[in-house]
Amino acid sequence: MAYKYVDNYREQGARKKLVDELRKKDIQDEQVLQAIGKVPRHFFFDETFWNQAYKDIAFPIGEGQTISQPYTVAYQTELLHIKKGDKVLEIGTGSGYQCCILVELGAKVYTIERQQKLYERTKQVLPRMGYKPKFFLGDGSKGLEAYGPFDKIIVTAGAPTVPEMLLKQLNIGGILVIPVGNEELQKMVTILKTGENNYERHELDTFRFVPLIGGPLTP
Ligand code: SAH
């Protein structure tokens, strides 16, 4: 079944402007920008709010849920250096917007969400838009051991610490991108797995995500 909305010239134009805005905000990866230029973000909004869909802001989309700010999605995606065919784990499916960007880049995406309503809604909606990742319901802070290891792991909720289980489920050469901090503010952290027990860690800019809920939650 096709999705109920259409992607017409007005939305396509607004999307182009968003891409230009992200480029000015120093998103440099042209493939990431192209993916943002392809995914119809207004499909995630009620029609009443389509005039908000291509602003660079986060927005409430129901179920107490927020669709992430395009800049944040682009920023995290850029850090993942996705190659076609990469096996990617996304923790925090939410609206599914970030997931669509990863699929556009040619990743094989495994996405996990802990809220059942969101999980069910996104699992229905994304395939109708033409995006077919694998959906899971559960606590993503433990990763997805049965399906690992992964080339890339992206956490789209703020974590108090880097969950050990996620590091274990990375391939050597793999990258984890995760916001780490308290409930107010988090630093974007990238971890490159350089050997079985060796990691290279970088701390980048500050963001504000909704909290990653689930163990381990010790500081
Ligand atoms: N990637 C989403 C943004 C999601 S906001 C998008 O593009 O819209 C963060 C999401 O993480 C929320 O939906 C929240 O329910 C979910 N979440 C929080 N803790 C989680 C956990 N331990 N496991 C899986 N999902 C979690």
Image (spheres, rainbow, N blue to C red):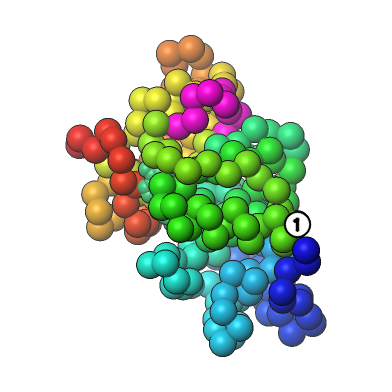
Q: Indicate the amino acid at tag 1.
A: Gly
Name the residue located 38 percent from the left edge and 67 percent from the top edge. Answer: 64
Disc 1 crowd, CA 10 A, few/some/many (<14, 14-19, 20+): few
Name the residue located 24 percent from the left edge and 49 percent from the top edge. Answer: 182
Q: Secondary structure at mark 1?
A: loop
Marks counted in the figure total 1
Question: In the displayed structure, would residue 130 be above or below residue 189?
Answer: below
Name the residue located 51 percent from the left edge and 14 percent from the top edge. Answer: 195
Q: Is residue 203 left or right of residue 84?
A: left
Q: Which of 190 and 114 lies nearest the eye of the viewer?
A: 114
Q: Quadrant of residue 13 in the image?
A: bottom right
Q: Is residue 21 visible?
A: no
Whole-percent x, y for residue 212 in the image: 34, 47
Mark 1 beta carbon near ligand 1 (under 8 Å): no
Whole-percent x, y for residue 144 in the image: 49, 30
Judge whether residue 151 is colored magenta: yes
Name the residue located 43 percent from the left edge and 13 percent from the top edge. Answer: 197
Q: Which of 7 and 127 lies nearest the eye of the viewer?
A: 127
Farthest top residue in view:
196
Q: Is residue 175 visible?
A: yes
Which quadrant would the N terminus be assigned to in this image? bottom right
Whole-percent x, y for residue 93 in the image: 51, 51
Q: Is residue 176 left or right of residue 97?
A: left
Q: Which of 173 and 100 lies nearest the eye of the viewer?
A: 100
Question: In the displayed structure, would residue 61 be above or below residue 218?
Answer: below
Whole-percent x, y for residue 161 in the image: 29, 36
Question: In the displayed structure, would residue 8 be above or below residue 212?
Answer: below
User: Which residues, given as a range, are shown in magenta?
Assistant: 143-152
Judge whether residue 25 is colored magenta: no
Q: Which residue bears the numbered disc 1?
A: 130
Q: Is residue 6 left or right of residue 94?
A: right
Which quadrant would the C terminus be assigned to in this image? top left
